[in-house]
């Protein structure tokens, strides 16, 4: 099914749900017959951005590289999903300007909720002062000023957040609307 490529850029704190939502979105797109690729932050750091650290400069380089690959994919008809913290607003906007079709999704949850969730055990250590440059605790996170979509993962289920993103994409014509179940029978 032909469709235009675009970049779906997930940004948010560690543990907010970027990776979870990105994998669910990729699966959903594939099931709908779209071509998609996922650039996951952790994975990118072991390949494309191996050797980069967590200074502002290295974080920006990481985000620019992800943005560059996403742009190449998107302009070739692929839905490029990115899931990296990407903490700096200016750098995200720089990547946005390189794109024709760019959808920024703010995967939002307060640090307190993430510390409670603490998927990787990192917040406990960061809050104890053991991790320098930990985004949201000992390093900045600049929330998007005008994201296309915001999901609040501290008070939504994964399915609800997923639906909010898919609904936006359908409403704006990035993907086709799914026929409601049973609609064919009426
Ligand atoms: P990140 O990629 O942002 O570091 P992960 O996706 O690895 O975060 O972890 C997010 C965790 O939060 C997972 O355990 C996931 O099941 C949970 N979670 C709870 N509610 C949501 C939601 N609405 N959206 C995404 N993840 C959620």
Image: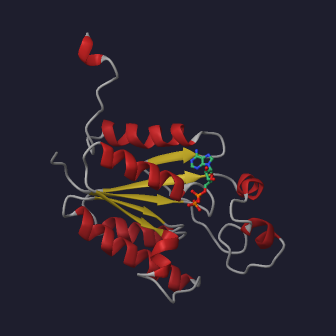
Residue plotted at (62% across, 64% down)? 14
- Give percent across and percent down for residue 148: 41, 49
- Give percent across and percent down for residue 70: 32, 68
Q: How was the colour assigned to the protein in this rendering?
A: secondary structure
Observer-nearest of 182 and 68: 182
Q: Is residue 41 left or right of residue 133?
A: left
Residue furthest top as drawn? 186
- Give percent across and percent down for residue 160: 53, 37
Q: Is residue 69 left or right of residue 139?
A: left
Residue furthest right as drawn? 128
Q: Is residue 81 left or right of residue 3?
A: right
Residue plotted at (45% across, 47% down)? 149
Residue furthest left as drawn? 2
In which quadrant will I find the N terminus? top left
> Residue 170 occupies which quadrant of the picture?
top left
Q: Is residue 127 above or below residue 35?
A: below
Res 146 seen here: no
- Give percent across and percent down for residue 179: 28, 27
Number of numbered markers: 0
Residue plotted at (15% across, 48% down)? 2
Residue plotted at (39% across, 37% down)? 167
């Amino acid at each position: 099914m032909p469709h235009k490529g675009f970049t779906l850029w997930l940004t948010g704190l560690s543990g907010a749900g970027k990776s979870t939502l990105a994998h669910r979105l990729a699966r959903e797109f594939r099931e709908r017959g779209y071509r998609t690729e996922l650039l996951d932050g952790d994975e990118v750091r072991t390949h494309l951005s191996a050797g980069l650290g967590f200074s502002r400069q290295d974080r920006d380089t990481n985000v620019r590289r992800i943005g560059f690959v996403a742009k190449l994919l998107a302009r070739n008809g692929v839905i490029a999903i990115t899931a990296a913290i990407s903490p700096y607003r200016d750098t995200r906007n720089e990547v946005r300007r390189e794109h024709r079709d760019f959808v920024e999704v703010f995967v939002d949850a307060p640090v307190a909720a993430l510390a409670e969730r603490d998927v990787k055990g990192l917040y406990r250590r960061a809050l104890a002062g053991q991790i320098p440059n930990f985004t949201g605790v000992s390093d900045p996170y600049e929330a998007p000023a005008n994201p296309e979509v915001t999901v609040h993962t501290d008070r939504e289920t994964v399915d609800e957040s997923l639906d909010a993103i898919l609904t936006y994409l359908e409403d704006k014509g990035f993907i086709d609307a799914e026929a409601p179940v049973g609609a064919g029978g009426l």
